[in-house]
Image: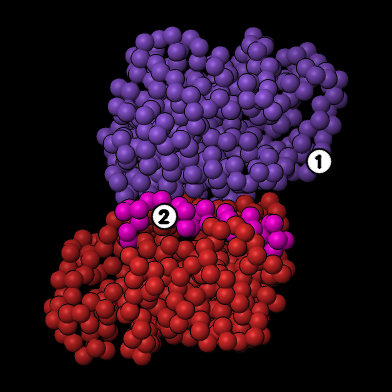
Chain colours: A purple, B red
Amino acid sequence: MRRVCITGGAGFIGSNLAERLSALGVEVVIVENFRSGRLEFVADTLARPGVRLIEGDVLDTALLEDALEGCDWVFHLQANADVRHGLEHPRLDLEQNTIATSGVLEAMRARGVERIAFASTGSVYGEPEVFPTPEDAPFPVQTSLYAASKLAGEGLIAAYACGYGFTGLIFRFVSILGERYTHGHVFDFYRALQHDPTRLKVLGDGRQQKSYLYVQDCLDAMLLAAERHRREAGVHIYNLGTEETVVVDDSIRIIAEHLELAPRVEYSGGRRGWIGDSPLIQLDTTRIRGLGWTPQLGIEASVRRTLEWLDANEYVWLPTPSEAAL
Amino acid sequence: MRRVCITGGAGFIGSNLAERLSALGVEVVIVENFRSGRLEFVADTLARPGVRLIEGDVLDTALLEDALEGCDWVFHLQANADVRHGLEHPRLDLEQNTIATSGVLEAMRARGVERIAFASTGSVYGEPEVFPTPEDAPFPVQTSLYAASKLAGEGLIAAYACGYGFTGLIFRFVSILGERYTHGHVFDFYRALQHDPTRLKVLGDGRQQKSYLYVQDCLDAMLLAAERHRREAGVHIYNLGTEETVVVDDSIRIIAEHLELAPRVEYSGGRRGWIGDSPLIQLDTTRIRGLGWTPQLGIEASVRRTLEWLDANEYVWLPTPSEAAL
């Protein structure tokens, strides 16, 4: 890798990637609209030579083509990642995830960039019948607009790989935890307990099984696959996760222990936390392990690492500029 | 069914559906942009009571909401169906197939219409490893922008079915033949032989296996499934095809016999006719047969029926108004 464009490069995963790549001497172009990304996440990285920030949205074609100039890879991480509220604004996933991915691919064609790594999701398996779920599980039925929009992005990348000779890497993530994590169960519970240490409201019955992966393990896997396939046109699909699962109640226990609290837990009930929530996610990671990858942290250690980072970075509780403007 | 909106209702399949439904006394609202649809296809049907034509594109939200007023079903058939040339204009499939389907679903929400039947494609299986290919074949990799855009439409319908309680019927078609067929191998070969009866240029090696279904058999299946699932929210997915296949050379033989010609056949070579062409399509139709459906015509009879219709309707060789304007 010589120069890499990271869309969503000041977000949770993107900023960690930017930091690692720039430390390796790779030039980095960060594209960020600062909807969920934060300037604090990339402040140190931006001080390094060869790192450039372009503020704007990937739906802005001219901006994106400018960002891609001279790049040999795009890591397309920008997305609307709000799975739960998709039904309240159904165009958002289409625009931010599907149409945006088409725009990235078109800008790549325009600029002669032919390698893309894409953050997809284990949610594309819907409610699978096979556990752990492999990449070639039975053709799934989508259960959320978020997953449908990511699957549409996968399809576009595969068609471009087949039709234009692109190299496309598709990573189907479980939930990612670690430094700069600011979205999801663990964050929500931590914040709720800071607000009211005596009780915690939980969507679902607390028994939904979730799988988490530590962000540095996630980046190890993505960079390893990118290295392996850099000269191989076509699409390469990898599940990324640990094969462990925890139930929501386990996460609550770890967080409560960490905060030294004993809240009363109130469940909304039901197997799913919300419509489209999956009661069980556990991905088969045989394929990525076959490249020699092993995660360094288990789930409980990932959760604790995340909590320590949240303790030490209180600024994440302040609204971002775009949140403050609402 | 009381009132049905058919997008692409003056197209090949849509006009046959409009004709059948109106003959059954169902009110029909035809939405048609006349890109590939033709006024001749619906002239007789429009003379019937309860049939209305709205000329325009499904991307026009206001027009679509008007069309859906009082409907209990939408048959969403409008699409860019040009699989082969997708790579020449990669936004077209996204707009006409994916974004348009999102628009139809949003108009349905706005007008309280909760049942949709969708024309998808067996191409969503990419290059499958299982033949005949069932609906729950291993999670496929997309090989064309057309199929990717249709799969994206499927995902949207499934997510709306799950999230808003819609009834979504998804039909994965093989190629359809019969009255008003004006797009595909058989049409192209017939036209080429009329232009030059001495020789025929063929993409690929002539050994690509294709599967065809007669349009009235296709409509039987769609209407049967719609009747069966009319009170069942959720998504219901059906392959539609015969389990026969023919190779491209068989089609050529039938057409040449019908026209009483003996052309020299020139092959471009290769297992695929074009990038993204599938060398073998054969769908498992156990699921739709389980509802009691059986196709009435085999492939050879379908091809002959199609050729007879082409013989008797020379106007299809004239350009449509939109083609003439190019």
Figure quadrant of residue A248: top right
Q: Quadrant of the N terminus of chain A?
A: top left
For mark 2, what is the residue?
Answer: B92
The residue segment tinted magenta is: B84-113
Which residue is located at x 67 percent, y 39 percent?
Answer: A84
Q: Main secondary structure of the magenta part?
A: helix
For mark 1, what is the residue?
Answer: A269
Q: In the structure shown, which secondary structural element does the residue marked by tag 1 occupy?
A: loop
Is residue A20 positioned above or below A291 on the image? above
Is residue B184 positioned above or below A273 on the image? below
Between residue B249 and residue B3, name the one nearer to us: B3
Between residue B63 and residue A64, name the one nearer to us: B63
| Kind of residue at badge 1 | Gly
Are dots 2 and 1 in contact, CB under 8 Å? no
Q: Choose mark 2 or mark 1, whichever is in front.
A: 2
Is residue B86 positioned above or below B227 on the image? above
